[in-house]
Image (cartoon, rainbow, N blue to C red):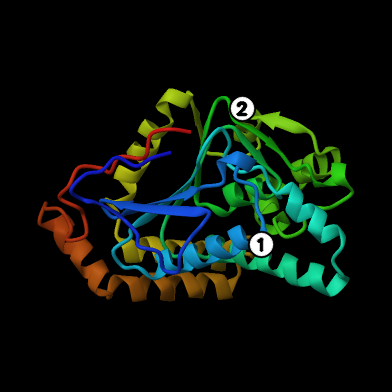
Amino acid sequence: MAAKKTPSTRKRSARPAMQFVEVTERNAVAIVILNRPDVHNAFNAAFIGELTATFAALDADAAVRAVVIAGAGTSFCAGADLNWMRAMAGYSRAQNLADAQALAAMLRTLNGMTKPTIARVHGAAMGGGVGLVACCDIAIAAQEATFALSEARLGLIPATIAPYVIEAIGTRYARRYFLTAERFDAAEAYRIGLVHDIVRQADLDGRINEVLGMLLQAGPNAQAECKTLIRHVSQRPIDAQVIAGTARHIADVRVSPEGKEGIAAFLGKRKAAWVPADPPPEAPDGG
């Protein structure tokens, strides 16, 4: 999946050098390409480490307003690499624990990013690939995409991805798809809440561009605070503590520089300072 070169496009110099991850930035959007197409972008230890470093670096980069995760080749992400699984079979428990903790850290880093993230899903998303989808704020899939939480078929469990997948699809559907390990299509992924939109493959990038255009109209600090708000309020009883916390939160945001600028722009009938002058970014072709 190659990014089109434009004057506002820059491909990151390696920091550190990446073998399996390609990052292109265009109009304040970073496109993270999972780049192991020969194995359907399956995970191994090195790939997981590169993704963790990439997500952390992009979250710290003030020039990046949104992140799109896409897969090179015919699949989004097929879960665990077979050679990596063979190696794990010979690991001690301590080695397996360290390995699992690295995957958990990568997922936590993605899930905890302060800026908007979009999963661009085509082809197969299996096991850990479903975890990536669930960790993103927005998931848009091609109609032809397929999904599976296939671990039980191998005598394993989808443990590190479970918090994010269950948050996305709920306990009831997790009880089915964790246990059957069956494959399901994009329509079912949409029905159970794993993805937000499904479109024809040819329309996938166009729909992502539309969503990116909307994301760039919103204040970056407000988006980060929205994500914090969701984490603080989600699945908690609506009690006095939660209500008081929400009041404090909006009061703090109202007096922030971005909050003041947003209100002034609205009242002055002008664009806020953070709204880009460029047209909405183009997502990469391919997939």
Whole-percent x and y of residue 243?
Answer: 52, 70
Amino acid type, label 2: Ala
**In whole angstroms, how far apart are the C-alphas of marks 1 and 2?**
32 Å
| Left or right, 287 with reference to 154 | left
Amino acid type, label 1: Ala
| Residue 205 visible in image | yes
| Left or right, 115 with reference to 264 | right
Residue found at x 54% / y 62%? 50
Q: Nearer the viewer, residue 133 or 173?
A: 133
Q: Residue 187 — which label? A: 2
| Left or right, 165 with reference to 271 | right
Tell me if label 1 and label 2 are in contact, CB under 8 Å: no
- Identity of the residue furthest to the right in this view: 155
Residue 64 is drawn in which quadrant?
A: bottom left
**Vertically, is 275 above or below 178?**
below
Kindly state the secondary structure of the residue where label 1 is placed.
helix
Whole-percent x and y of residue 38?
Answer: 60, 40
Residue found at x 59% / y 32%? 123
Kindly state the secondary structure of the residue where label 2 is placed.
helix
Q: Nearer the viewer, residue 268 or 240?
A: 268
Count of labels shown? 2
| Residue 194 visible in image | no
